[in-house]
Image: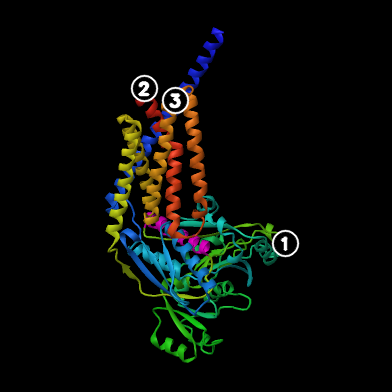
Amino acid sequence: MDVQRSTYYADAKRKVIIMDNATNIRVYVFAIFVLLAVLSMGYRFYTNGSPVFLGIDFAGGTRIPILLERPVDSATMEQIVDTIKKRASSYALTEARVRALGSDELVVELPSSNEEYVSKVEEILSSKGVFIGVIDGTIAVSGDEIYQGTIHDTTAQEAPEHRGSGPGFWSVGFSVTEKGKSMMANAAFGKPNYPVYMFLDRPTNAVILIPKDAMWKNVDELKEKFGGKPVTLSDDTLLNALRDAMKLEGDDIPVYILEDNSSYQNIKPLNNKTVVLVPDTVSDDIVENLKNKGFKVEKKPYNDFVPNYEVNSALTFVADEWPIAGLMNAPGISPDMTHGTAGYSYTINGEEKGGSIAESVELAKQEKKKIMSILKGGALPVQISLGNRTIIPAPLGGKFLEMSLFGALGVILAIAVFVGIRYKKPKVIIGLLLTSLGEVLILVSIIGAFSIDLGAMAGIIAAIGTSVDSEVVITDELLSKKGNIKDRVDRAFQIVMTTGGIAVITMLPLLFSGLTEIIGFAISTMTGTLIGMFISRHAYAYYVRKVVLKE
């Protein structure tokens, strides 16, 4: 009997030691997370003047009006609001408010007045978001057939396949539906090595006039890709490459050299909406002549007319990128895909060139984010135009922030009073408050890296309450005399993990609701709960055992 009892105590002691070691590690992890949170907020304060990024409620921002080309019904307006909200939020990973005003106008409010940031968001919002892939004049894939949840960054995976690419290379991958797969298989059948022209917002009902020097600008660096074989390039060679790229059944886009007036002298518009795209360097005489023919003329930046070319496996010159046409790239069709079968996964890639390696990398990062944001948001059902932005003041922002901070402070003080009355042990009060404070620092550092609005602040305050609730459970169980210490810890964490899991599950519908106004609350609450469940609660339990109970 004594031998059995001794064995039991030895096993129990061994389990406690193992538990001590595991929990002790959690204490160090908790301390490291708190330290990283403080350093992170300190760095943001040093670089941005604020330890956290505040939302519109606290710091104001920028309002961008958006006008629709025609009035729409409520269902269509709801779709437009949802699309624009997804684009803006997925690009910046921060709060973006979108409100409809009547049937033909809406406004977007961003929690920033930074010129570069706002300009990038405006660029994303102004895109209609229509994606198509064209093979030999036939649509092979469209944005309607893309699973939005599969859109992801594939730069690292694709880079080895593009060995000649520089630091500005980027790639975005996605998967298509069964219908999309069939479209690709049919369009690619019997056409090995044909280019797949990938367009985002390809012009419609348009004519392009390209300056001759722009057409030739990027040609010399590609001659070596012909493998040393002699090649003769001419205006016609380059022009035909561009015209091949702009073929589309029912909507070919004619391309002419701007300086060759005779080639487009007799062209006529299809209707009163036919647009001629010209560089902003074009003379007024040419613009007036085109308008007199009945065309609408749109001036675009000269650099948008500069194409990039590639040489395919058949050593044929192919237009690979052309901003004015929305052409992003033109990969060749693998022979394996030309027998009536095709895959579900595809990529879009490109390369940005800056004045330095760092600038090229940053440009690629921005372009990749822009493409992903537009694809994730989807296409807009009507054309839109952006109005003049205005700055949103935050006259009540300071008051909102002050009230929120007082609310959080009030919660902490109420906790101290409650715990003092309940346990009458200063060590418990100190441990509980320090643990809650550390948890809040971690949570604020994480949420503050994106944007803290009223919803997020409410979630932070709610997380404080959840934290204290769990710590009270842990304290009660450990101070009780029911069973050995391991059993008491197990009971405490069974309750903590169960209630925490329920809290996370409860927040999931809010997280995926699509309502920006409450997503911040859901994220804050869930993040705080998870930090507590897997880090801070264990550290607090260790503190109670070693400091309060002195085990």
Q: Can you give x and y, in whole percent of width and height, for residue 347 in the image?
A: 56, 58
Q: Which residue is mark 2?
A: 550
Residue topped by disc 3: 21
Q: In the current view of this chain or complex, which residue is farthest to the bottom? A: 292
Seen at 64% across and 60% down, the residue is: 177
Q: Is residue 475 visible?
A: yes
Report the coloring of the rendering.
rainbow
User: Mark 2 belongs to which amino acid?
Assistant: Lys
Of mark 3 and mark 1, the one earlier in the sequence is: 3
Above or below 216: residue 206? below
Q: Position of residue 108 (x, y in %)?
A: 41, 68
The C terminus - image quarter: top left
Majority SS type along the magenta span? helix
Q: Residue furthest top?
A: 2
Q: CA distance from mark 3 to mark 2?
A: 16 Å
Q: For residue 340, which numbered disc appears in the image?
A: 1
